[in-house]
Amino acid sequence: MRVPFIAGNWKMYTNLQEASKLASSLVNSLKNPEQKEVVICPPYIYLGEIREIINNSGIKLGAQNAYFQPQGAFTGEVSFTMLKDIGCDYVIVGHSERRQIFNEDNELVNKKLKASLSCGLSPIFCVGELLEERERGETERVVRLQIESGLDDIPAEDFVKIIIAYEPVWAIGTGKNATPEQAQEVHSFIRKLVAHLSNGSIAQEMRIIYGGSVKAENIERLAEQKDIDGALVGGASLSAESFIKIVQ
């Protein structure tokens, strides 16, 4: 039985007061969420404060990115070991905004996945196609390449520590979203691919979540799909009321 997984990616939003208020509202409404795993991913600079607010609430702490080296002269970067040290359980790796805006390629994403696992952090591994790639019928080719490259040289037994997030790039922050049937089709493809790369048992245990303009209005139909195990929520996670509805 795969435990539903819901993560809120706050991106580069909130100041300290807003972040603290949002986290407090979630704690008050989602204390020890039953039969679900709930994660929030604030901006780096607020991780310490948010950790104190959500401590013992059942809500887990995640980060939005990290650099694969454990330490060094990398001005402005944060390591996975630093995130683990400050109390994170999860970290987003390979988000399309990192790939598109900051030119992160599949090789770098693979290094980050390995670094995350090596220090005991569970990565939320994002994959997804551009609009023009979907229109050319290349969704499966793109997703296959991202997953095979990302999981390269990672032991199959570690796959279950990874959350795969399918996020069609054309649906992120656009108000558009894949239909539940479109999302299920890709999720099913991903699960079969993971089975090919490992085995059927690991593929059935691995959680695969959907992201891309997830809202309270569409989460129910998405959650009904056989291979959709939760959501990576962007804009809707910045409203306590909206995120609580999604979790519930």
Image (tube, grey):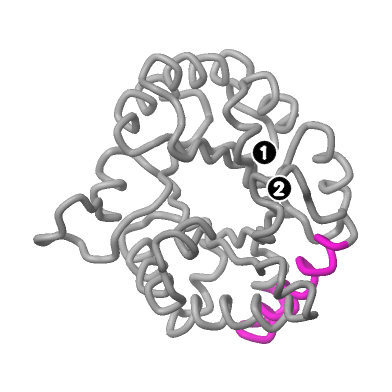
In the picture of the structure, the residue carrying the numbered disc 2 is 230
Residue 192 at x, y percent in the picture: 75, 78
Choose top left, top right, bottom left or bottom right for residue 63: top left
Residue 46 at x, y percent in the picture: 33, 29
- Residue 133 magenta: no
In the picture of the structure, the residue carrying the numbered disc 1 is 36
Depth order, front residue of 11/101: 101
For residue 225, above or below residue 61: below
The residue sitting at 53% across, 29% down in the picture is 58
Choose top left, top right, bottom left or bottom right for residue 163: bottom right
The residue sitting at 29% across, 65% down in the picture is 68
Depth order, front residue of 97/221: 97
- Helix, strand, or loop for circle 2? strand
Residue 137 at x, y percent in the picture: 80, 80
Q: Name the image quarter holding the C terminus.
A: top right
Give the residues in magenta.
Answer: 182-201
Q: Is residue 77 left or right of residue 33?
A: left
The residue sitting at 68% across, 54% down in the picture is 209
Q: Amino acid at mark 2?
A: Gly
- Residue 185 magenta: yes
Residue 152 at x, y percent in the picture: 47, 83
Label placed on residue 228: none
Q: Nearer the viewer, mark 2 or mark 1?
A: 2
- Helix, strand, or loop for circle 1? loop
Q: Are marks 2 and 1 in contact (CB under 8 Å)?
A: yes
